[in-house]
Amino acid sequence: MTSLLFYCIPVFIYALVVKLRERASVRDIAGRLGLTVGPARYYGWALGFLLLTIGWNALSSRWWPIAGAAQEFAGQPPTVGNILRALEFGLLATGLGEELLFRGLIGGWLGRRLRFWAANGIQAFIFTLPHLLLLMEAPHLRPVVFLGPFLMGLMVGWLRLKSGSIFPGWMVHGLGNVFITMKVMQW
């Protein structure tokens, strides 16, 4: 949960600055951050993107071993406790935190200032940057470490910018992380 708090710090600072500087309402700030439900059709898109994400994770993990935070689950038995930890890791610690920061704050800010594809491409690239740290751990994963996060960023960024909400993208990102975490457990 430390990572969720880490991701929330700039979001809270942004919300506080907007509240004090512009006297914006909580509803307006929530809207700017994508903390709205959004149209139902984008949850259907999210389901399709989730299937693509699971397929990508299943295929790429056949050729490239899992690196990064999900490694802590490698070889763990699928006990109720470990499955709950995987859900917390995928949905809250990484999925929600990253969606709040990269799509809610950064994607929303860019989306209000740039054309759609420029905003989406830039936020996806920014989302990819911290994932490149995995190259220090596993330099042979170069294609997967760049392509995976960048494509994920484009998909969930599209959902965020089109729907106005981070929740469809959170569904894809969080459940995709849960899938890969469960995959590395000892089944």
Image (spheres, grey):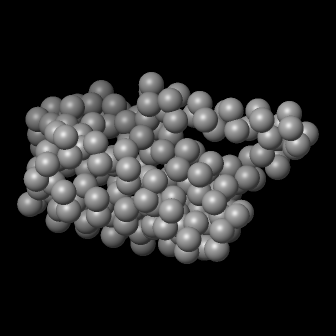
Residue at the image position 16 percent from the left and 39 percent from the top: 137
Task: Locate the C terminus by quadrant.
Answer: top left
Q: Position of residue 13 (x, y in %)?
A: 68, 32
Q: Is residue 137 above or below residue 144?
A: above
Q: Position of residue 61 (x, y in %)?
A: 15, 57
Counting every numbered tag in the picture gives: 0
**In front of the other: 50 or 11:** 11
**Quadrant in the rendering for residue 168:** bottom right
Q: Is residue 158 above or below residue 57?
A: below
**In front of the other: 4 or 180:** 4
Q: Position of residue 36 (x, y in %)?
A: 70, 54
The reply, left or right, for residue 16 in relation to residue 125 is right
Residue at the image position 77 percent from the left and 35 percent from the top: 17
Determine if residue 88 is in view: yes
**In front of the other: 177 or 141:** 141
Q: Position of residue 15 (x, y in %)?
A: 74, 38
Residue at the image position 63 percent from the left and 38 percent from the top: 11
The reply, left or right, for residue 90 in relation to residue 101 is left
Q: Is residue 56 above or below residue 80?
A: below
Determine if residue 159 is in view: no
The reply, left or right, for residue 113 in relation to residue 61 is right
Q: Is residue 47 above or below residue 172?
A: below
**In front of the other: 105 or 63:** 105
The reply, left or right, for residue 135 in relation to residue 8 is left
**Quadrant in the rendering for residue 108:** bottom right
